[in-house]
């Protein structure tokens, strides 16, 4: 498949002057729904991938192959630009290169590589970060592995929450100098820290969820934030809906009496039933 168009649309978001919320997606159907509703970008998180593929907590148990396969399924279902959280790149800088190649092939538009020391070490009680030098090496490796220049490489750090804003700025500047296309900050960002970061670097910024001013898109846009996550509630909502439905059926409720079920028209729309009927008529008769 040809992925460049969606990557160029993703880069247009980074180059714009507004802040957008991406749609949190986890499978082909959720991605189609997000695209239908007008989301400019889809977000596939490592934690949600672990839930979806393995049914396990986000403890770096998912493999690169499993992650890339699910990303491909999502991308092949529509044309929504997809950004992904590729954690630490599944290892060292050489593993990062493999990660970029696999996810680029899977059609991803933007890839985050973070500087958290993963997986969790023996006896570890709080998150640790790799050195700035190793982080820079990972960013440079990611950029070297990229073949499509329209693919965005995003340097991600949780330094503001782990080691403080001064270290976060040091890392952001180092990753910017290495050549990444944007910077993502996971936690630790308040107004003062965001103001400091926006003054320290020129790259487009991205944030995790936040309340108050940190959820105000106009304020965030004024600080060069182009993408701000809102969390990953759609997957949790899907889990609750499945639980409620199965519980009701188990307790004897008739299928015809179930509430909150997608209509036949919606199911046909999100499964592209009309396209398949057209193709059947065109190619099988």
Image: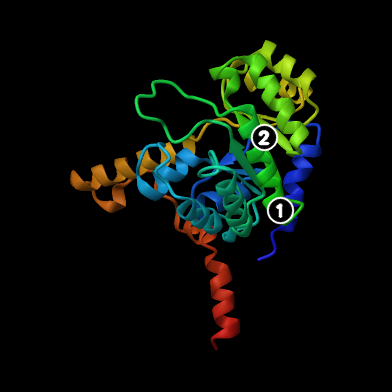
Point out the image quarter for the C terminus: bottom right
Point out the image quarter for the N terminus: bottom right
| Disc 1 target residue | 6
Q: Nearer the viewer, residue 235 or 223?
A: 223
Residue 186 percent coordinates (x, y) = 58, 27
Is any part of residue 33 visible from this angle?
no
Taking the spot 59% from the left edge, 27% from the top edge, the residue there is 131
Q: Secondary structure at mark 2?
A: helix
Give whichever of discs 2 and 1 has the lower sequence position: 1
Q: Quadrant of residue 280?
A: bottom right
Q: In the shown orientation, is residue 9 left or right of residue 94?
A: right
| Disc 2 target residue | 136
Q: In the shown orientation, is residue 77 left or right of residue 9?
A: left
Quick one: label 1, few (<14), some, or many (20+) residues within 10 Å?
A: many
Q: CA distance from mark 2 to mark 1?
A: 27 Å
Residue 109 percent coordinates (x, y) = 67, 49
């Amino acid at each position: 498949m040809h992925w460049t168009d969606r990557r160029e649309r993703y880069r247009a978001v980074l180059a714009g002057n507004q802040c957008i919320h991406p749609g949190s997606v986890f499978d082909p159907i959720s991605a189609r729904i997000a695209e239908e509703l007008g989301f400019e970008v889809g977000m596939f998180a490592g934690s949600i991938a672990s839930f979806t593929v393995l049914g396990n907590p986000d403890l770096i148990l998912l493999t690169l192959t499993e992650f890339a396969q699910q990303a491909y399924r999502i991308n092949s279902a529509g044309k929504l630009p997809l950004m992904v959280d590729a954690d630490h790149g599944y290892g060292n800088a050489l593993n990062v290169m493999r990660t970029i190649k696999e996810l680029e092939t899977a059609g991803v538009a933007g890839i985050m590589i973070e500087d958290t020391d993963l997986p969790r070490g023996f006896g570890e009680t709080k998150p640790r970060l790799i050195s700035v030098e190793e982080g820079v090496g990972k960013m440079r490796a990611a950029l070297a592995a990229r073949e499509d220049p329209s693919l965005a490489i995003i340097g991600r750090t949780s330094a503001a929450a782990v080691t403080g804003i001064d270290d976060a700025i040091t890392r952001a500047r180092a990753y910017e100098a290495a050549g990444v296309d944007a910077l993502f900050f996971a936690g630790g960002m308040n107004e003062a820290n965001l103001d400091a970061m926006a003054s320290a670097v020129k790259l487009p910024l991205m944030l995790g969820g936040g309340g108050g001013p940190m959820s105000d898109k106009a304020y965030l846009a004024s600080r060069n934030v182009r993408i701000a996550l809102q969390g990953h509630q759609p997957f949790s909502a899907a889990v609750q809906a499945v639980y409620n439905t199965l519980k009701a059926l188990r307790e004897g409720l008739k299928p015809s009496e179930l509430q909150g079920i997608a209509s036949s028209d919606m199911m046909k729309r999100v499964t592209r039933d009309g396209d398949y009927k057209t193709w059947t008529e065109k190619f099988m008769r």
